[in-house]
Amino acid sequence: MNNPQLNKNGELQHLLTTEGLPARIMRDILDRAATFLDTTDGHEIKKVPLLHGKSVFNIFFENSTRTRTTFEIAAKRLSADVVNLNIGSSSTSKGETLLDTVDNLCAMHADMFVVRHAQSGAAHLIARHVAPDIHVVNAGDGRHAHPTQALLDMFTIRHYKKEFHNLRVAIVGDVLHSRVARSQIHALTTLGVPEVRVIAPKTLLPTMVENLGVQVYHDMAQGLKDVDVVLMLRLQNERMQGAALPSAQEYFKNYGLTEEKLAHAKDDAIVMHPGPMNRGVEIDSRVADGPRSVILSQVTFGIAVRMAVMSILAGGKQ
Amino acid sequence: MNNPQLNKNGELQHLLTTEGLPARIMRDILDRAATFLDTTDGHEIKKVPLLHGKSVFNIFFENSTRTRTTFEIAAKRLSADVVNLNIGSSSTSKGETLLDTVDNLCAMHADMFVVRHAQSGAAHLIARHVAPDIHVVNAGDGRHAHPTQALLDMFTIRHYKKEFHNLRVAIVGDVLHSRVARSQIHALTTLGVPEVRVIAPKTLLPTMVENLGVQVYHDMAQGLKDVDVVLMLRLQNERMQGAALPSAQEYFKNYGLTEEKLAHAKDDAIVMHPGPMNRGVEIDSRVADGPRSVILSQVTFGIAVRMAVMSILAGGKQ
Amino acid sequence: MNNPQLNKNGELQHLLTTEGLPARIMRDILDRAATFLDTTDGHEIKKVPLLHGKSVFNIFFENSTRTRTTFEIAAKRLSADVVNLNIGSSSTSKGETLLDTVDNLCAMHADMFVVRHAQSGAAHLIARHVAPDIHVVNAGDGRHAHPTQALLDMFTIRHYKKEFHNLRVAIVGDVLHSRVARSQIHALTTLGVPEVRVIAPKTLLPTMVENLGVQVYHDMAQGLKDVDVVLMLRLQNERMQGAALPSAQEYFKNYGLTEEKLAHAKDDAIVMHPGPMNRGVEIDSRVADGPRSVILSQVTFGIAVRMAVMSILAGGKQ
């Protein structure tokens, strides 16, 4: 089957999902990302001219200041021109179709689109539509995929654990509604993690989730037992008010990550979260701010990983 | 009469309207625009340092993501610093007058204002008010003028038809409420187009429109007969719900551009539209996406034309 | 007591308030600002590479297009990458805490935060929290402080009056709710102005305002007598509709600055206002636009002063 993310030479053409993304491409992205981080100080990210003269359009049909900012910073670190478009308040409300909007932006000399959309598949639709010299990065589509988040998580895991082939990883929380979880599972299994667990109440798990190659747990003590990595998911506010959960307090009692529950994991386990965190709901502050949390490193690595994706797509040689 | 767009040497000082704009200035803009387009690939627009160190303020009192984006891209291609101001949500709501807002922005070291305003004459008012080293570009004022749109249309026509003096051009649709139509008519007649037609129902034509030097048609078959260029206008949603029109369906039946109606035009006629399009209202998708449509070329040329206007106004020598 | 604005070498680490800011630091800022203004033409502000490769985040928890724009322009004149964040509509509404938001932005490689917040002390809170290589500029916090406004006012006074030690300065209007007034009073007294007056009705004065080292007047004729500088304050609309004032007309009659009232000041007195002005409420148009008004110079100098603050904080050597 044709992979819409790769060109005919097998190179990355768009980044739409981690599902079906070859391991060699993932590793290339992680390796490239490492080059953007100053080895003496993980915080410093040098400004490089790789995308000088290129135009990156952040087209956000769904509001997300945080994600938009990470892509904006990454593009500016690469010396690209960045244009932010909050399309919710724009032409589509004037009756124009999504693809007419995209055609117009292409005609304005876009080199790359970073797309966020509430509908699953929106980034794929755009990628299929644009000319071959234009690249699309999926910054989150519905419940479907959020590949740069998953790749920065992989970068973080590799940074702290060096290898994937000997790890036990647990994903905890609202897997059902989470594009992050879906993208993490595909990335982890592709990169060779032998044991991926999901821990959640039944109401927050997709049916047939086992088919994704994961082991299912409903109990934190069992699910966290001897894991190397704990990937927490954000519990969205609307879930807490809905029928899927009895209450935020009840959820925290059963699935909130506390030091007590974390004690079941390995001593050197790391804790990750895609943010923004609901402290006291899915995670306790002592864990979030504790020695095993690498949550802020994820954010820094996220800039480097987005720079890597963009520069591989549009930047040509380094 | 003094032309507020020209300085005392007859050079372009502001771009406010195509009415009264000398043909030599229009031709200069079109010629300069051509230099920004890569001749081997019409899509590529090189980044040039002509406005490096200059500050362009997009001040939009009326929301228009699309137009704002084209000016932002054009200014960034010229290496200007661009500041976007959505004034609707800003100081004017704090009781400050329009001219106080403008004075403040001038004092912040603006070199150029790109102004969009719902009131006709707003850009003129600002141009009369600012210091001589500050330039104003009208990006649409009320029903009055939209000169960069008209100039990019002229560029597109010249690109495909080479000359103006032997053309028959039809403007179709809501001429009454259209600043685009007004600016197109002035540009076409100034550049020597011998026959400009408008085609619309009486309710969508200004009184005395013939005084602008156009021929009036109410029937598409007659109006499109043997034309070289068809300039479609957008039918704004509020018109469709108002008293001026029976219904969008009825409008499409009579004035919507279909392949059948387009057959009355010359075989090599081109079809243009300023966007965003209402497919199935003023234009049929088979025409919009068909071989005679040059609608997306208009968008690309629009970047080059806006770069030309800005660089002639503020960029000095090339 | 430890000064949170200075590092252990006594250099500026954050700019949070003019209260307790040493006179030598204030003078450094004013001197540095002068270097950014072209001496042959006060309007021109050259683009310099002092912050090339640095990232400035404008994080505005309270909307202010005008103040945000001045910082954006200043940062771009310094060649920084600027990211604008309107946090009101972002993560904090997703339940994230202020400090989690800040931590995330730090992890995105911020070099400097420009912070506007409706709560007094917000900038201090952030400054205490961030790593030592990150700098915070307070762009207005609640009723507490607005130090860059006060410093640009000091620059303007020094520009026109040369010295501080022989001046009589009056601050007129709503001192009670004004962070600008508070910051002005601290700056003026620190820089050695021997006589600072406040003129306001009792309902618009803080209790114990005399403790700040000012003389209190309730009558304009007496308060403006022989002053060198008149600092007008903005009367916010909500005050005019509240219980603190009988009406805008009544306020203008008693405290609005007219030519008649200004006649009590020295002949060469200058008039200043932080903007946006309410013409006909706190200031008459003949004064605002008259020969003694330096209101627009304040805006221009404000860019230079903000460039000075930013370059001293993050730009290293000049």
Image (cartoon, coloured by chain):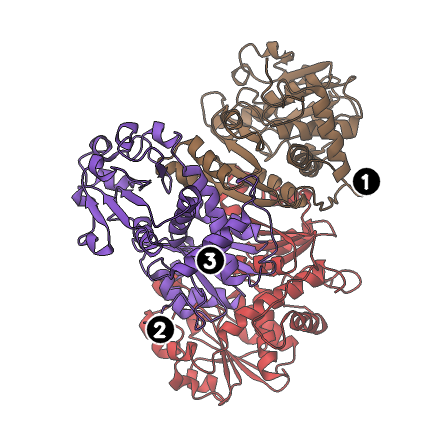
Chain colours: A purple, B red, C brown
On screen, residue B211 above or below A256: below
Callout 2–callout 3 Cβ contact below 8 Å: no
Closest to the camera, between mark 2 and mark 3, is 3
Which amino acid type is marked by label 1?
A: Thr
- Crowding at label 1, few (<14), some or many (≥20) Cα neighbours within 10 Å? few
Pick the front one: A71 or B206? A71
- Residue at 63% of width from left, 23% of height from top? C6
Which amino acid type is marked by label 2?
A: Gly
Query: What SS does tag 1 mark?
Result: loop
Closest to the camera, between mark 2 and mark 1, is 1
On screen, residue B27 above or below C65: below
On screen, residue C315 above or below B119: above
Q: Which residue is mark 3?
A: A28
Which mark is drawn over residue B50? none
Which amino acid type is marked by label 3?
A: Asp
Q: Which residue is mark 1?
A: C39
Give left or right: position of C83 versus A276.
Answer: right
User: Do marks 2 and 1 share a subunit?
Assistant: no
Query: What SS does tag 2 mark?
Result: loop
Q: Which residue is mark 2?
A: B280
| Quarter of the picture holding the N terminus of chain C | top right
Q: Position of residue B66 (x, y in %)?
A: 49, 60
